[in-house]
Image: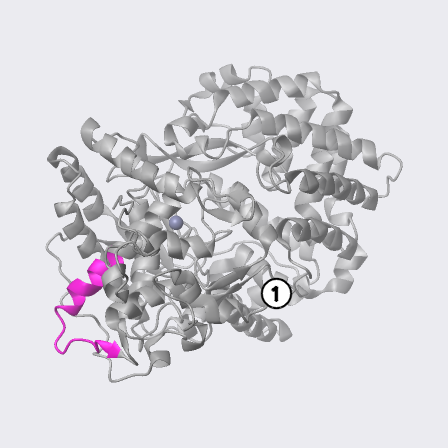
């Protein structure tokens, strides 16, 4: 899920929640990072009008998803979502199905219509013609079949020239410039110690399995997955036509990946920003791995003059350079060739796509390859996202959508401000910088003010060439940031993305339009529903990331700086440990527990977000004349709030995906994102009249924020 510096992502493979576009923008989208600099700002009036009498369905709650036979005080997820989980089937071409996926599907269908229309015939509109051409080439299966492995021929030829460590380094640089990242990867990053500067950042890379653990541990289905992976490698190499040598090549590549897995940092270790921050100059870089030709490498990437580099873990590069010197050139060629096959398969012909899919099947439990159009929609979103998004936001984020989302954001910020003032465990010397951090927290809402231009040629008949051009253009765009001032308005997700993020080095959160859609957010929903799923579940969640186990280590300006007093830090650490221990007791699937440390940041954000959203709703409600309806079909507005949050996580997920996420993903499964949060909410017990000591009102909550 994108660079590790972006902490936020709400959802699974980091997905957060909802939708899709088309026509022309008339409400001027002022998507600039609204600075939240006015500490006195108290939202007096939301842009939405007081809701008239409404049904439960009109309020934004899905009545059919509720299971009235379940007891909300015993298992709130079962109550809020049982009607859904008992009847829903996961479509064969997906690995989960629920609220997020429904919004995602709606987006995909919308974008599909836009792209089919744009691809049908050139219109003279440069944006539509570009996305239409890209999509048409992606859909041209006949041309893709005919091309066979031609698109990767030049890469394989370059790899064949590797005869020693030095030529291996040249091949690595060439592959990195094509977006293929054996051994490690280079990308721009803000300097942790001076967030105004963009420097180069080196990070570990080069594994084909979802986490280093898969090479080294035997938990759950890991051994089976490993065996499948090795056979999959053999079959992929065979597709190149070298049947006799395929097994040897695959074995060598697997051995290198295993060696890298041993050398790489564990994801829990990487949650500590200090563990991944070691800024060096060129002399320092040479020292980490003197035998690696760094000058040539950087030159090949077009950044030969770069002088400031963050190295996530210096000894990793020392060891990689040793590996390059001790392995035979033939073994290095095998590993590089495998990496090219693995990372290029999805742009090649059907046998490659199908074989690559066997691995997805194994890991995620998905049964059928998604239809080509859907894969192509995602490809266009990935490669030309801010062109594709233009019609999306006109259609799906029109009118006062943005103003409403901004107001909601301001209401949650105001609640956090009140919270920071009264937090009992925080001492005054820490409270000052904490409040300053909140006041400087910026937010992007909906979509960018200025659309990105994609300055490369597109061929309607050559898909692989388009992907290559898009990849190279994006790499060049990224590398050009090094040495320049930080652009706070450069979005890290596309507008139709059903997700959101917080970036600690920018102290900024972003809420793409795709997340601000029904059933998560609606102009005519009961305000308690908007506050529950979006105010708490999304905005409060992202805001809390600024203060979670990782985010709390960065200051108001995005610098890695310890602004905590020791005594307050100790209390924060103890509160965090409570959350770690709580979630460590939960199982993802029978026999596989959650990693409480890996998921700590997301769990803190979920818990803090829902609490903040609730406080924000009550403060907002108290200011309304007339107040919103306090009863909807027998549900109080407080109940609607929690129900909306719970239903935003209604989801069925394959056991395979649940297990893979438990091993490698910082987010907890949907069920625990609901029940794990609810047991810690002071407002929930009273809202549902749960007796003290009931499973969902246990009386010993974990509370960080
Ligand atoms: Zn998050």
Residue 513: image location, x then y, percent: 39, 64
What residue sits right under mark 1 in the picture? 374
Residue 264: x and y in percent read 55, 28
Residue 617 within the segment the image draws in magenta: yes
Q: Which stretch appears magenta?
A: 612-631
Q: Is residue 7 visible?
A: no
Q: Quick one: which residue is furthest to the bottom in this view?
A: 53
Local SS, label 1? helix
Q: Nearer the viewer, residue 555 or 531?
A: 531
In the picture as drawn, the residue positioned furthest to the right comes out as: 244
Q: Position of residue 540 (x, y in %)?
A: 29, 55
- Left or right: 21 in relation to 183: left
Residue 335 shown left or right of residue 133 in the figure: right
Q: Is residue 116 above or below residue 293?
A: below
> Which residue shows up at 60% across the image and 22% down it?
320
- Relative to residue 539, is residue 638 depicted above or below? below
In this rendering, the answer to whether 339 lies above or below 46 is: above
């Amino acid at each position: 899920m994108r660079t590790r510096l972006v902490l936020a992502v709400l959802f699974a493979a980091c997905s957060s929640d909802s939708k899709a576009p088309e026509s022309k923008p008339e409400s001027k989208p002022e998507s600039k990072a609204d600075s939240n600099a006015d500490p006195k700002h108290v939202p007096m009036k939301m842009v939405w009008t007081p809701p008239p009498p409404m049904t439960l369905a009109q309020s934004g709650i899905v009545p059919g998803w509720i299971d009235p036979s379940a007891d909300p005080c015993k298992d709130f997820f079962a109550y809020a979502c049982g009607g859904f989980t008992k009847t829903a089937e996961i479509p064969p071409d997906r690995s989960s199905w629920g609220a997020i996926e429904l919004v995602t599907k709606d987006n995909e269908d919308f974008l599909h219509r836009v792209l089919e229309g744009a691809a049908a015939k050139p219109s003279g509109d440069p944006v539509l013609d570009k996305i239409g051409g890209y999509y048409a080439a992606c859909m041209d299966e006949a041309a893709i079949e005919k091309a066979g492995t031609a698109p990767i021929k030049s890469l394989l030829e370059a790899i064949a020239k590797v005869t020693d460590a030095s030529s291996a380094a040249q091949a690595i640089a060439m592959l990195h410039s094509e977006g293929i990242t054996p051994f490690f990867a280079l990308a721009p990053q803000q300097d942790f110690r001076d967030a105004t500067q963009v420097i180069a950042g080196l990070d570990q890379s080069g594994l084909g399995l979802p986490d280093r653990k898969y090479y080294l541990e035997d938990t759950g289905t890991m051994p089976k997955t490993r065996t499948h992976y090795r056979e999959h490698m053999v079959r992929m190499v065979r597709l190149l036509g070298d049947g006799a040598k395929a097994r040897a090549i695959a074995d060598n590549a697997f051995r290198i990946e295993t060696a890298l897995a041993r050398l790489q940092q564990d994801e829990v270790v990487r949650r500590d920003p200090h563990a991944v921050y070691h800024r060096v100059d060129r002399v320092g870089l040479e020292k980490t791995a003197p035998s690696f030709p760094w000058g040539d490498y950087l030159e090949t990437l077009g950044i030969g003059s770069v002088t400031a580099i963050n190295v996530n873990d210096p000894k990793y590069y020392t060891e990689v350079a040793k590996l390059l010197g001790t392995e035979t050139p033939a073994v290095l060629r095998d590993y590089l060739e495998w990496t090219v096959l693995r990372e290029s398969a999805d742009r090649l012909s059907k046998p490659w796509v199908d074989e690559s899919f066997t691995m997805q099947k194994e890991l995620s439990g998905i049964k059928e390859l998604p239809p080509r159009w859907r894969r192509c929609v995602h490809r266009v979103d990935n490669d030309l996202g801010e062109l594709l998004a233009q019609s999306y936001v006109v259609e799906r984020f029109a009118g006062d959508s943005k103003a409403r989302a901004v107001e909601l954001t301001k209401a949650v910020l105001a609640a956090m401000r009140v919270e920071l003032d009264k937090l009992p465990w925080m001492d005054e010397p820490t409270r000052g910088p904490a409040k300053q951090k909140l006041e400087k927290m910026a937010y992007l809402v909906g979509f960018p003010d200025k659309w990105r231009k994609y300055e490369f040629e597109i061929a309607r008949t050559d898909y692989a060439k388009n992907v290559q051009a898009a990849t190279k253009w994006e790499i060049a765009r990224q590398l050009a940031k090094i040495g320049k001032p930080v652009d706070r308005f450069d979005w890290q997700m596309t507008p139709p993305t059903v997700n959101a993020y917080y970036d600690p080095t920018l102290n900024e959160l972003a809420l793409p339009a795709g997340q601000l859609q029904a059933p998560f957010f609606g102009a005519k929903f009961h305000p308690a529903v908007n506050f529950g799923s979006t105010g708490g579940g999304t905005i409060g969640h992202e805001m809390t990331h600024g203060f979670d186990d990782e985010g709390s280590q960065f200051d108001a300006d995005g610098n890695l700086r310890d602004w905590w007093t020791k005594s307050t830090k100790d209390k924060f650490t103890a509160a965090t440990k409570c959350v770690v221990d709580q979630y460590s007791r939960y199982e993802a699937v029978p026999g596989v527990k959650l990693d409480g440390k890996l998921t700590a940041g997301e769990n803190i954000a979920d818990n803090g977000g829902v609490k903040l959203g609730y406080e924000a709703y009550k403060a907002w409600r108290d200011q309304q004349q007339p107040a919103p309806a306090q009863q909807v079909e027998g549900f109080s507005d407080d109940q609607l709030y929690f129900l909306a949050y719970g239903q935003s996580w209604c989801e069925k997920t394959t056991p395979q995906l649940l297990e893979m996420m438990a091993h490698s993903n910082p987010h907890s499964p949907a069920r625990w994102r609901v029940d794990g949060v609810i047991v810690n909410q002071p407002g929930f017990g009273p809202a549902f009249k749960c007796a003290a000591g009931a499973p969902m009102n246990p009386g010993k909550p974990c509370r960080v924020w």
